[in-house]
Image: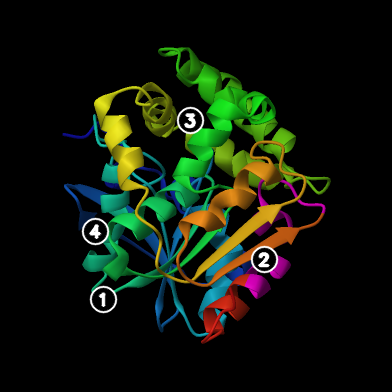
Amino acid sequence: MTDPATPSAQPASVVRPDVPGGREVIHRDVAANGARFHIAELGDGPLVLLLHGFPQFWWTWRHQLVALADAGFRAVAMDLRGVGGSDRTPRGYDPAGLALDITGVIRSLGEPDAALVGHDLGGYLAWTAAAMRPKLVRRLAVSSMPHPRRWRSAMLGDVRQTRAGSYIWGFQRPWIPERQLTADDGALVGRLIDDWSGPRPLDDEVVEVYRRAMCIPSTAHCSIEPYRWMVRSLARPDGIQFYRRMKRPVRVPTLHLHGSLDPVMRTRSAAGSGQYVEAPYRWRLFDGLGHFPHEEEPAAFSTELINWLRDPEPDR
């Protein structure tokens, strides 16, 4: 069961804004894991599936969609469950379930596998999907997010990381965070993006797009639910089982991208993730960038990503 905020009910101007250069992006809905997911697609070639983080939606990858398509890839950016033009379901926001959404979309697109590219929460889920369904993940690229087990140890064992991720602890309150995110036309979304960016913040027009998207009914609640699970499950059997499952190493080539000035996820927290990869692993630190390197310096980010995707033998 979904609420009225399903893909067909969303104003096109909110969930389907234009991409750079006026490129004609194909928008459609695909079924996977018991729900409908909105995707934005551009180009032909090997599939690259792009996964957004908080507080954003598919449009965060607008620059990479164009760059990847021009480089000969089938670039697809999806809205995660509960966000943008995808279904808002009453449950299904645990990372294992969300990872099955992602692998289900790969199958629905008729592809044998995909290179997954995830930022923030999308990166957490990309790590998860690569460990759970390795046959469906050709390569893995993660930005601004450590491996889930590394995230857990940093949040619980590093006081500085605990402080940096204080917003996640604040999300554990019932209903108050949802009201805060939507108050004053999503003003808090704008403040979070500005605070988390590096010295080159995103344009006001860009931030306004994310503010409007967060104010779609039920989006704030659905956006917060994964973070509630991540904290509340730490001592529960389902959480313990999940983190045990994540001991399974990632066995596909992995590119790990991070902004040196990221105030949300400290470089030290992210940098230890290579221990969970039994495949070529490349770490790339972008000097002077914050939590959104793919938007703060889209050309540099896209170049790094495309060169790595094209490399037949990425070094360890």
- Using the image as rendered, state which of residue 212 and residue 225 is in the foreground: 225
Answer with mark 3 or mark 4, whichever residue precedes in sequence: 4
State the SS at label 1.
loop
C-alpha distance separating marks 2 and 1? 26 Å
Predominant SS of the magenta segment:
helix
Residue type pointed to by label 1: Pro
Residue type pointed to by label 4: Gly
Q: Report the disc number at residue 112.
A: 1
Q: Residue at x 52, y 35 (%)?
A: 153
Q: Residues within 10 Å of mark 3 (few under 14, many from 20)?
A: many
* Residue 184 horizontal side relative to residue 140, left or right: right
State the SS at label 4.
helix
Q: Report the disc number at residue 301.
A: 2
State the SS at label 3.
loop
Q: Residues within 10 Å of mark 1 (few under 14, many from 20)?
A: some
C-alpha distance separating marks 3 and 4? 27 Å
